[in-house]
Amino acid sequence: MQIGRWMAQKAKDADKVNAENETQRRIHQEKLQKALIDAAKEHVQVNLPNSDQPAIPFCAIISVPSYPDKKFDAHDGEVNAARFSNSGRLFVTGGADRKVKVWEKVNGNYTLKGTMHGSNAGIMSVQIDPQEKLVLAGSHEGACRVWTLGDQRLRHTLTGHSQKVMSVKFFGAATKVVSGGHDRTLKIWDLRSRVCTRTIFAGSSCNDIVINEGMGSQVASGHLDKTVRFWDVRSENQSSVGEITLQGKITSLDLSPDMNCMLASARDDTVKLLDLRMNQVMSTCSADGFKVAMDYTRASFSPDGQYVICGSHDGSIFVWNAATAKLDKILKEHSSSVVVCAWHPDGSSIISCDRNKHAIIWTNRY
């Protein structure tokens, strides 16, 4: 009964959001057409007002970035994690060398802004908070750490997982952290008190988590037992409020921009698109030669939700059309398994990282 009520409310909320999205989409298309015409006539310099919170770039993807513009050694060994900040001005990487690195875009090029030390094992997950003041990482030693970006000082060490932490995310305006680990638990941490406020026993080792605060602070977790589980973190109930079982170990999750769809990459060499309104698989992305190499291979949506991207064991990057699940293109430049791919928030570039310390920035510049 609880799942039924939750699904009914979710469908009702989704219908409301869809109606609002349709209106906004129509307005957006009209504005975009006019903006493109104006942009073709002249260059316009826009000066943004000062703000404590970085502006989020306007996203209008016309084509998938496919030119390997920059290739560099990001870490001394395997690069396990990479993520852009909300503004796209920064991106952060984490490696098997136990380091967290922050890179900044200056004059069109990304340069190393700082290196965060303090972890005693390889980094598996990273994130910059929305205000670009904090850096979060989870590691093989079962700990989560938070650094301040300005001075690169370690501020919090959150210990409690008994095995490696595979995924960490800021939650609740960066005052909380949610972590998922191979000890089969999810933990919620309060950064103000520096304590774990809740432990959820998830039943299987967790490889990734996503947070949908628009749906009542819901957390989804992907597991080695091939199941995606949904949790209401406001409730003290230890039971999940929904589950979707796939055919392979879940390696990553990502939420679509409209929050109606989720992708789940799996070790059966597929990327599934899940309909969150119907709680079922919507379509499957696969291709000849595509092979998910690791239990923590990370796939992602494009910022407009039109494309799905995931790295393969042979160093290729596969791109699918999300609406049709058909292969759009294959990017080839890496020489070893691609671990993670992440989009710039405005869709202008992609960062991909591999097991041989290399990172590549893909753009549309030829």
Image: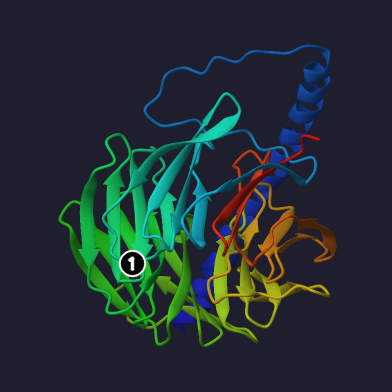
Residue 273: % across, % down = 68, 69
* 120 and 347: which is toward the camera: 120
Q: Quadrant of residue 151?
A: top left
Quarter holding the C terminus is: top right
Q: Amino acid at mark 1?
A: Ala
Q: Quadrant of residue 43?
A: top right
Q: State whether residue 167 appears in this view.
A: yes
In this view, the residue in front, 212 or 358, is 358
Which residue occupies 29% across, 60% down? 119
Quarter of the view holding residue 299: bottom right
Q: Is residue 171 visible?
A: no
- Indicate left or right for 231 with 19 as reference: left
Q: State the colouring used for the structure image.
A: rainbow
* Pick the front one: 200 or 265: 265
Q: Residues within 10 Å of mark 1 (few under 14, many from 20)?
A: some
The spot of residue 316 in percent (x, y) is 74, 63
Residue 166, position in %: x, y?
42, 70
x%, y% of residue 234?
A: 32, 66
Name the residue carrying label 1: 121
Q: Is residue 168 above or below residue 83?
A: below
In this picture, is 133 found above or below 5? above
The residue located at (56%, 85%) in the rendering is 226
